[in-house]
Amino acid sequence: MNVKLFIFVVIVLAQLAVLYAADTPVQKPNILVILADDLGYADVGFNGCRDIPTPNLDQLARQGVRCTSGYVTHPFCSPTRAGLLTGLYQQRFGHENNPAWLPQSTVAGLPLSQTTLPQVLKRAGYVTGCVGKWHLGAHPQFHPNRRGFDEYFGLLGGGHVYTPGARGSVEYQIPMDRNGRPEPLAEYLTTVLGREGSSFITRHKGEPWFLYLAFNAPHTPLQVADPLMGRVKHITDQTRRGYAGLIVGLDDAVGVVMDALKESGQVDNTLVFFLSDNGGPIGVTHSDNTPLRGAKGDVFEGGIRVPFVVSWPGRLPQRKDYAQPVISLDVFASAVALAGANVPAGHTLEGKNIVPYLAGEQTGIPHGRLFWRAGGGAKFAVREGDWKLVGWENSRTQLFNLAADVGESKDLAAARPEVLARLSQAYADWDKDNVAPLFESPQASRPKAVKKAPAK
Ligand code: CA
């Protein structure tokens, strides 16, 4: 080969290499969000639970980062889901209550003005699936297939019976919905949802996908399949035993889903979030939010701080704890960043891409302040660093230092008036951008009347 020809060949090869590199996109991770329903902070092994076996959830936590201050944006079901799927505090658009089961109502549901995470990811080339509890409106205009999901299977309301043929309210015994078509519930519900999630994961191997897998377990009714009951028979409290049975079913289903990831070779390229939509309703299911104060419906930690794991073996460390506050809004922001997706103009992300923080690549903290508001302002809270402000309409506002008092037992409002004033002002400023609730919760699902501040 003469010198000129050799140089020519080298140049061509170099150009081909550049072209190849430009045409080979960075592989986009799959995104799997597994949501539990009413799962207490301390009711999983990875958060210290001793009486309910959750080996699959514990394994998921071991192969990722356990966020010990992982929050949701609301102390009950539907508003948290509205925040998670829009990446916005749901009070910005009035989704502050549970929508009633009203198939004729074009109001009671996630407003069509809002852009959802699956809509954004679809534009970035993702196939999108939703399996499980929807609870974002019963009118056909709110159906998951019309809100960004290519595929849907599940229960459209706020809950459902678990056992085929069991009796419940209308909402709880409607047929399953598969892409707009009714389908009878043929088997134990949690088992079915696990299998449907697993099927989605396997079928879409080879393309980037987003799966929102929202179990209704361990929300009431406490209907447990017999084989599951045998695994919690050591629990003497009958109510907690039923609740535990629902969690064991959930854990089994998560195991099926994780097996599907493993068997299809997608573990390293899938970012998994596992969290609950709110804290445990202690009085109803005898769930356990230890060491946190309060329960579902409260803006004390027990209502809003939840079991929260982020796992991505290809990118994140394993067996790691992360103590800085993170929130369900971060699911949207993280997913959009990793997918290289664009949000519509005017859509201000209120969460953060937390992956660089969890990976230890980015120092500092994701959130300076986090906010909560329920009942149109009847209850509210702010977290700033270790400080937590908890307020009620027309009542005295309290202040806690979570580093010293995670159980929110010692009110420091009088001792630290400057912090009280700063956080109160921060809440007022944040609240200026909120609107009044668009619809009210149905009576049955309404959390108990506004809780009075504890004795002063
Ligand atoms: Ca819930």
Image (cartoon, grey):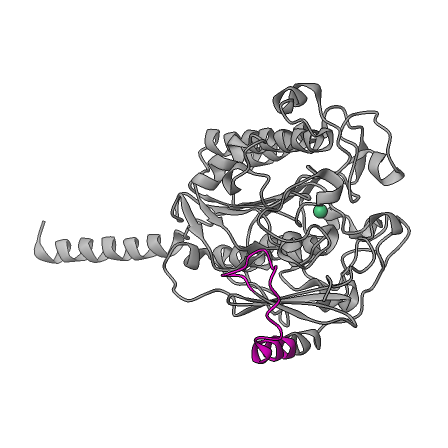
Quarter occupied by residue 172: top right
Q: Is residue 410 magenta?
A: yes
One can see residue 349 in this view: no
Which residue extends farthest right? 104
Measured along the vertical axis of the image, is residue 174 above or below residue 226?
Answer: below
Q: What residue is rendered at 80% in x and 55% in y?
A: 109
Compared across the picture, whether 232 is left or right of 79 comes to: left
Residue placed most toward the observer, 396 or 107: 396
Picture coordinates of residue 388, whole percent (x, y): 59, 66
Measured along the vertical axis of the image, is residue 40 above or below residue 343?
Answer: above
Quarter of the picture holding the C terminus: bottom right
**Which segment is the magenta one?**
401-426
Residue placed most toward the observer, 105 or 325: 325
Q: What residue is rendered at 69% in x and 50% in y?
A: 295
Residue placed most toward the observer, 84 or 289: 289
Q: What residue is rendered at 50% in x and 55% in y?
A: 339
Q: Is residue 201 magenta?
A: no
One can see residue 333 in this view: yes
Which residue extends farthest front? 456
Picture coordinates of residue 380, whole percent (x, y): 70, 66
Picture coordinates of residue 439, whole percent (x, y): 84, 60
